[in-house]
């Protein structure tokens, strides 16, 4: 079952009736979301409520069309892109949450395509800060990045994301980060350790690898920050130490930090072979100073050290 774009549009309109529309504020882009099947609303309300716009004016840069495919002869997932109208089509037979997790966080590759402009990118990283100044945590999975970021938020740091975020660069080469998703991911072990802090969250299920739990943290939107200035990179690694430590990264460590961020982003966004996107991110992040944080087994100490470091703003003294 194959469609031309025009045929697909007519097929959806004829078979699925009138959609419900919602608008998403992605800062650099405004997106219209057309939902033809109510099964999607639970995922939308669980994963991206922070970016749902109250402004319903009919002005937008791109459109995403969602429907639950009912035709037995159709593929399990239909993805099409109409370049002329900037419309992305996504239809799936299985709309259960576990299936979306297997496909990657809901809509992440579409968002990546929409946000990949000359001065903005969707990246797989984390960001927190204090008093309006933030740091970007660069590390691939299983390096303690999410645990450090989430624990830092619980300890009073201003929060952007522990997973996916929008990076922007202005005309003066200043970097800003904004949240996209209202979810966090934590290992079962860390979930147990943070149980008291997680009491007001909603557990959604497992991630694609089934090694982490996914939580809706909409109740913590008050801690979220958008268009948040990023002043430095932080490279976290689990170290054999009794107490955590932080110091300026070596040239090799900064290279590893950026490589892990770039590789993780390319893998998650499906842009492994997009050398242009990789070069753009390198150019964006290279001027930032980088700091290495050795993580101990004490997640509270790790978060307090990061909070103290960001509060001192020492990384600003040598900014390029």
Image (cartoon, rainbow, N blue to C red):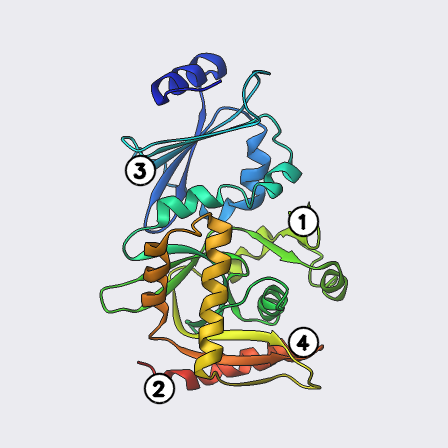
Residue 129 visible in image? no
- State left or right for residue 128 relative to residue 319: right
Q: Closer to us: mark 4 or mark 2?
A: 2
Does the residue at mark 3 contact the one at mark 2 (Cβ under 8 Å)?
A: no
Label 4 to label 2: alpha-carbon separation: 28 Å
Q: Earlier in the sequence, mark 3 or mark 2?
A: 3
Report which residue position mark 3 lands on.
60
Does the residue at mark 2 contact the one at mark 1 (Cβ under 8 Å)?
A: no
Q: Earlier in the sequence, mark 2 or mark 1?
A: 1
Q: Is residue 318 above or below residue 276?
A: below
Residue drawn where x is 30% and y is 39% of the image: 61
Residue drawn where x is 51% and y is 83% of the image: 309
Label 4 to label 3: alpha-carbon separation: 43 Å
Q: Is residue 109 above or below residue 304?
A: above
Indicate the secondary structure of the residue bearing disc 2. loop
Label 1 to label 3: alpha-carbon separation: 31 Å
Report which residue position mark 4 lands on.
300
């Amino acid at each position: 079952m194959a469609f031309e774009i025009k045929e697909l549009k007519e097929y959806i309109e004829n078979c699925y009736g009138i959609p419900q529309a919602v608008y998403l504020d992605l800062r650099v882009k405004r997106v219209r979301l057309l939902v033809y099947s109510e099964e999607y609303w639970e995922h939308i309300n669980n994963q991206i409520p922070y970016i749902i716009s109250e402004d319903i004016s009919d002005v937008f840069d791109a459109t995403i069309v969602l429907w639950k495919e009912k035709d037995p002869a159709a593929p399990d997932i239909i993805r099409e892109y109409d370049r002329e109208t900037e419309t992305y089509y996504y239809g799936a037979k299985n709309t259960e949450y576990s299936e979306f997790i297997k496909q990657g966080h809901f809509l992440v590759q579409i968002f990546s395509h929409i946000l990949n402009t000359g001065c903005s990118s969707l990246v797989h990283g984390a960001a927190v800060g204090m008093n309006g100044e933030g740091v970007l945590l660069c590390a691939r999975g299983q390096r303690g990045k999410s645990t450090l970021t989430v624990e830092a938020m619980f300890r009073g740091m201003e929060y952007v994301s522990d997973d996916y975020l929008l990076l922007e660069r202005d005309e003066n080469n200043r970097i800003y980060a904004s949240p996209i998703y209202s979810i966090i991911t934590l290992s079962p072990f860390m979930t147990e350790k943070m149980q008291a802090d997680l009491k007001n969250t909603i557990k959604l299920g497992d991630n694609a690898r089934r090694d982490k739990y996914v939580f809706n943290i909409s109740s913590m939107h008050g801690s979220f920050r958008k268009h948040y200035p990023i002043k430095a990179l932080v490279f976290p690694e689990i170290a054999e130490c009794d107490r955590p430590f932080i110091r300026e990264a070596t040239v090799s460590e900064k290279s590893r930090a950026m490589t892990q961020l770039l590789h993780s982003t390319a893998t998650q966004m499906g842009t492994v072979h997009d050398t242009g996107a990789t070069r753009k991110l390198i150019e964006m992040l290279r001027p930032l100073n980088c700091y290495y944080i050795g993580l101990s087994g004490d997640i509270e100490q790790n978060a307090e050290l990061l909070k103290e470091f960001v509060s001192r703003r020492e990384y600003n003294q040598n900014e390029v």
